[in-house]
Amino acid sequence: MSIDSQRSTGELPSPGGHTIPYILERSRRQPRTGGFLLLHGLGVDKDEYLGFYRTMSPKLTEAGFDVLRFDFPAHGDSKANATHFTLGNCALDAIVAAEFLLEEIGNSGLHVFGTSFGAGPAIMAASFFQSALRNVTLLAPAISYRELYIEPTHPLRTARYKDFYRDAVLDGATVPVSDRAALNWRNAIEFAMCDLVHQLAAIASHTAILHGEADSMVPHELSRDLAARYASIDLTIVPGMDHGFMDHNDDTGESERSQQNLRAILRKTLR
């Protein structure tokens, strides 16, 4: 933890019938410049893959921001069972967490950062609090649900999800994402019904997307399509970067190119 921050932990009550474990890091800088809400991806926790958010949080508090990160249902320290893991509950928890953060920072200066699956709930929370919103940063966003889960055509997705929708809805099949959570028929129906067009249109002028050109999980072409649809989105395609911040040849995130990616993401986040 940075010497420029103080940390507290707790749980927030969710209308979904579970609790939301969180870590709040308060900047010691005065005046504070706002608050960051960090939303993680599938199968990881509030620290994100390879501790990405744990690394990022001190940098943000040093810049004068309070930082809140939390666990989605059936992830990390969440005591919720697998049935609570739905897109709707994740979005609801993001809104509850954002409301809590805004109360802590004085109801202004909200910054939202979503990685991979966390990008969808990030968009929903950001659009809910537009009057307080400053910016949104999406890293390798998995928000084109139809192209990713329902009718995948890209080779990166077809092997895992080609029959997910049919098999989940008709046969109750699941696709594990961790030892506790799996995508199931509830998720399949939500992905089929959810279209983030209206929410993203409302916040596009506040939104930056970073996507690795070598992403092995979410094709970067999907982010290019989003940027083409919404001209005000600030899109950065990072050469050689895989899903997240890592270089495609780096499994630990410790290579110089991965560290360069981290610095580039932070610069864009603090724009």
Image: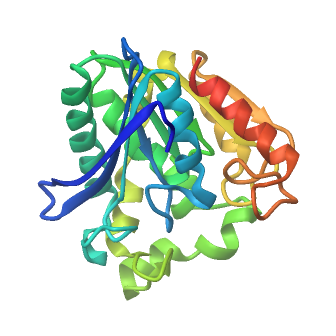
Q: Quadrant of residue 188?
A: bottom left
Q: Quadrant of residue 248?
A: bottom right
Q: Does residue 142 appear in the picture of this structure?
A: no
Residue pushed farthest top?
31
Nearer to us in this view, 252 or 31: 31
Q: Quadrant of residue 30?
A: top left
Q: Is residue 48 left or right of residue 224?
A: left
168 vs 196: above or below: below
Number of residue marks: 0
Residue pushed farthest front?
3
How did the renderer colour the structure?
A: rainbow
Residue 42 percent location from the top left of the image = 49, 63
Q: Is residue 88 left or right of residue 188?
A: left
Q: Does residue 267 appear in the picture of this structure?
A: yes
| Viewport quadrant of the C terminus | top right
Residue drawn at x 67%, y 65% as measured from the top left: 157
Residue 262 percent location from the top left of the image = 71, 39
147 vs 264: above or below: below
Residue drawn at x 25%, y 73% as measured from the top left: 79
Nearer to us in this view, 63 or 183: 63
Residue drawn at x 68%, y 69% as measured from the top left: 158
Residue 11 percent location from the top left of the image = 20, 56
Residue 106 percent location from the top left of the image = 21, 19
Residue drawn at x 15%, y 59% as measured from the top left: 16
70 vs 60: above or below: below
Nearer to us in this view, 150 or 213: 213
